[in-house]
Amino acid sequence: MSDSGLRLAAEARGAARPGGSPSQAFLRRFRRHPLALVSLLVLLLLGAASASAPLVEQAFGFTAEDIDLLARSAPPSAKHPLGTDELGRDLLLRLLHGGRVSLLVGLSAALVSATIGTALGLLAGYLGGRVDALLMRLADSVIALPLLPLLIVLAAVDLTKLGLSPELANASSTNLWRIVLIVSLVGWTTTARLVRGTVLSLRAREYVRAAEALGAGPARILWRHILPNALSPVIVATTLSIGNVILLESVLSFLGLGIQPPLPSWGNMLTGAQETLWSAPMLAVWPGLLIFVTVIAANFLGDGLQDALDPRTERR
Amino acid sequence: MTAYLARRLAESLVVLFLMSVVVYALIGLMPGDPIDLMITADPNLTQQDVARLKALYGLDEPLHERYWNWLTAALSGDLGYSRLFARPVEEILLPRLGNTLLLMGLAFAAAALIALPGAMLAARRPGGAADGAVNLAAFAGISLPPFWLAILLIMLFSVTLGWLPAGGMGEGGVVATATHLALPVLALTLASVGGHLRYLRASLIEALRADHIRTARAKGLSEPQVVWGHALRNALIPYVTILALDFGTLFSGALVTETIFGWLGMGKTIYDAILGNDYNLALVGLLLATATVLLANLLADLAYAWLDPRVSYR
């Protein structure tokens, strides 16, 4: 092979290094964040473990609700790997079931807030003017308000007074989705701001103006030309909001206004923990530790994704 | 400047008004209105009695008229009574606002004092080992569930070590108050220091990238002179803005902390009022908390102008 041929081949190989396809570049940048990778694994593991709760129950031969009267607030044993709570229920199984609820609420609320935030951000950024000013003032106000007491009021609202039948209003699934909705009401602001900013910079681009000149309507331009390019901030904001949402759900549940017992969530498992601190301290440690691990993993993952999805971070 | 202040003040009042409408409407949807509670207290009440009581308290009027009556009364200084305490709400709320501001102020100051050296250490060499450690600490801080942190602190300092009381206000004297305040302040500080660290680190790194910093280094200023004299002031501008916006979050954190430690502040009062069906107290408490937060935002805007003379107000 000639010299120039070698150089060409080397260049062809090298070409994949600094640029490569966008997804290759993403993977390469993402690999630079070992913490984000570990976090992703941890989250997947927690999700899988929680999802397999019924299988674990089968293997144990009893369920999370079964009360072992002879072993209340028991220390870890062969039968109960993490011990039992003050009623004699198996702590490990309760934690797994709590994980199902907490992760489900976290993921759903993050997705709902991302959807609301993206829609409002697209509107504000594309329409501009009064709509933009109004929506952004709204976002500012939501951020500035003392949210927790407001959410507590929302969570305390009696659904039967809104015309729901008592069975429906007190069903545990209603309880679950209502928390998702309440948390989403305040979770959309970050996404909306990020999307708005991206839209503002994108709508002045030539390709968008070309599409406009070709007669594309606002809906088509937003959906086909702007949204796909605004996805990176949406993904990052959604990931980062998972942590916040789980924290918010756990606080509400801890205060007795979120997920209602007997449905366990990591937050409401801590409600009684303050009273049992002296007799069974580990009851207060495990649920909180799982919340902490989940939230920090979501935050690390979001941080890693932020770097990996932003081509401007290509330096090292 | 005056025009700007007037506009911001007007905006805050609009937000406060909207908040009062929303909360008033929501409170109408809460379980157990006063008449329900009277019926449970006295089973001998007849339908006629109920109707008469509703008329007496104005509960038979439509929602917007009830709101209007409440608003005109409130604006003329009559904020109504608390059901739980059987006293005018302002007599209960004002001392508790003081308790909350004491807790929040101390925690805020402590978090800023921890964040300052931490951020300086991190910003000295972004991406270095110290920066990594500070970053990790900040991430851990923002990911900690505040109530869990409080429980762990009680476990360590009250249960295991027995150094500090697990809750309450402390009777008589500064020392008793201080020992009872120590754990809540520590909990709220640790819950908010992660955010402080992140914001201050980011803005300090940004400020140290400026051209005039290179000039300052080139003319031979020592590193402390560069950081304290040239970078910090610029770094404080975004830091102060973000923290002011976070004042509402700090209040939410205070609510959790107060509830766990039994510190009689605004947050705990609102929480207890909602759970105890004392809706007038909850309503006024929420509005007072909102007003406080909005005022803090306004003050931050003024601090912004003081820190950055380039800011022009339209």
Image: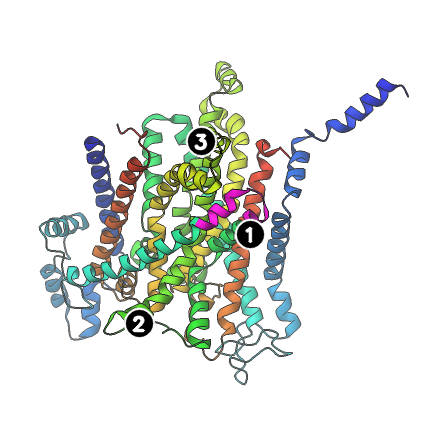
Q: Which residue is mark 3?
A: A197
Q: Nearer the viewer, residue A212 or A38?
A: A38
Tell me the CA gap for discs 3 and 1.
31 Å
| Circle 1 Cα neighbour tier, 10 Å, few/some/many (<14 / 14–19 / ≥20) | some
Q: Quadrant of the C terminus of chain A?
A: top right
Which amino acid lies under the numbered mark 1 shown in the image of this protein?
Answer: Ala
Residue at the far front in the pictured view: B220
Q: Report helix, strand or loop for mark 2.
A: loop
- Is the residue under label 1 in contact with that under label 2 (CB below 8 Å)? no
Q: Nearer the viewer, residue A178 or A106?
A: A106
Which amino acid lies under the numbered mark 3 shown in the image of this protein?
Answer: Gly
Q: Which residue is mark 2?
A: B168
Say whether mark 1 and mark 2 are on the same chain.
Answer: yes
Mark in front: 2 vs 3: 2
Is residue A180 visible to us here? no
Query: Where is A242 relative to B102, above or below?
Result: above
Which amino acid lies under the numbered mark 2 shown in the image of this protein?
Answer: Gly
Q: Which residue is mark 1?
A: B133
By secondary structure, the bulk of the magenta-drawn segment is best described as helix
Say whether mark 3 and mark 2 are on the same chain.
Answer: no
Seen at 44% across and 65% down, the residue is A268
Quarter occupied by residue B173: bottom left
Where's residue B256, x and y in %? 36, 61
